[in-house]
Amino acid sequence: MVFSHSQNICKPLPSDIILASFPKTGTTWLKALLYSIVNRSSKQRLTVENPHSLIPVLEYKTYGTTHASAIAIPPSNINHSRRILSTHIPYQLLAKTLDSSECRVVYVTRNPKDTLVSTWHFVNKWKKAKEDRWPFDVAVDKFCHGLIPCGPYYDHVMGYRKLCLDRPKYAHFLTYEELKNDPKTHVRKLAEFLGCPFEGEDAEAQVQDIVNGCSFEVLSNHEVNKAGGFPSRIAFIPSNSFFRKGVIGDYEEHMSAEVVEKIDALTKENFHSFGFMYGV
Ligand code: A3P
């Protein structure tokens, strides 16, 4: 896959898998799961490499550099039969590329209130000085106005939802909550969608093994996910900032009834009124 800055497009191969997500909606988890589904015996790699090292982010590895010419995707996963990439780029900006490709897109989303709380914690984890911390009320305001990276959240979700409804053979939509509540069913579905279903006598055991190996408890306890981090243009991102609590409904610990009401109203306006009954 080669990306050209001048044309601003990429041409995925039909065998490529692109994990798309809004930040803090379960990207790390899905990276581990997709890697494990595609490379069945991946347990060892996940104990020594952070999921973000295994699966490159399209925009950071390409457009994130200062190189002016076309840049090939780095070789971190060319040894595997299928390449897996991730992106936070909204569908609206990738539509031309994705609509004309036979690559498989997996989109994960998460309810807006937990996404916002997770974002707020993540940003504050980078901040060294206490006085530099991002106040929660400011985060709520920015989120509601779509003024956070890759925002607006609602447009991001609805864009990829459209792709998944229009091209179900090529694009698969799932939520953090569905995955959390029934990981085995969704791991099986993902494998079928990717054309590599679990079969044979040990299918059930393989699925269970992947679910266990990618669980929050197991992944967050690997040394590689506790120490170190990733230098980025914005800040040094500690590896452990990708693993905080991993639960559904943590917003209840942070949001007043008034804030909940405000975000729920936005969710109804942006999701429910378009027939997507999610997120409240
Ligand atoms: P919390 O901050 O609510 O705990 P992303 O990977 O898109 O950055 O999302 C990070 C969120 O996913 C964090 O949520 C993190 O704890 C959670 N997470 C990371 N790994 C997970 C896993 N294996 N299972 C469930 N949640 C996970």
Image (cartoon, grey):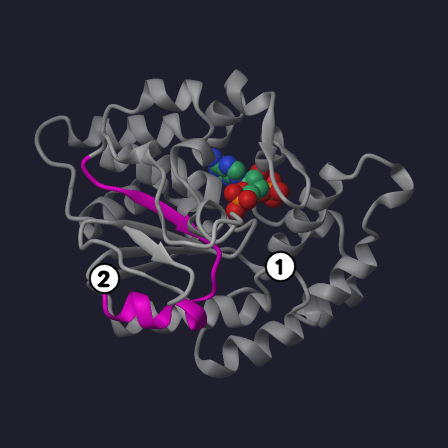
* Spot occupied by residue 20 in the image (x, y as percentages of width and height): 41, 55
Label 1 neighbourhood size at 10 Å, few (<14), some (14-19), many (20+)? some
Q: Is 125 in front, or is 267?
A: 125
Residue that extends furthest to the left in the rendered view of this protein:
200
| Secondary structure found at label 1 | loop
Task: Identify the residue shown where x is 31% and y is 43%.
Answer: 84
- Residue lying at 47% horizontally and 54% vertically, measured from the top left: 68
Q: Secondary structure at mark 2?
A: loop
Which residue does the numbered mark 1 point to in the structure image? 149
Q: Position of residue 158 (x, y in %)?
A: 46, 72
- The picture quadrant for ligand 1 comes to top right
Residues in magenta, as a range: 81-101
Q: Nearer the viewer, mark 2 or mark 1?
A: 1
- Left or right, 78 with respect to 200, comes to right
10 Å crowding of disc 2: few (<14), some (14-19), many (20+): many
- The residue at the far bottom in this view is 273
| Residue at which label 2 appears | 170
Q: Where is residue 235, by image quadrant?
A: top right
Tag 2: residue type?
Answer: Tyr
Type of amino acid at the residue the image marks with label 1: Pro
In the depicted structure, whether residue 276 falls above or below residue 105: below
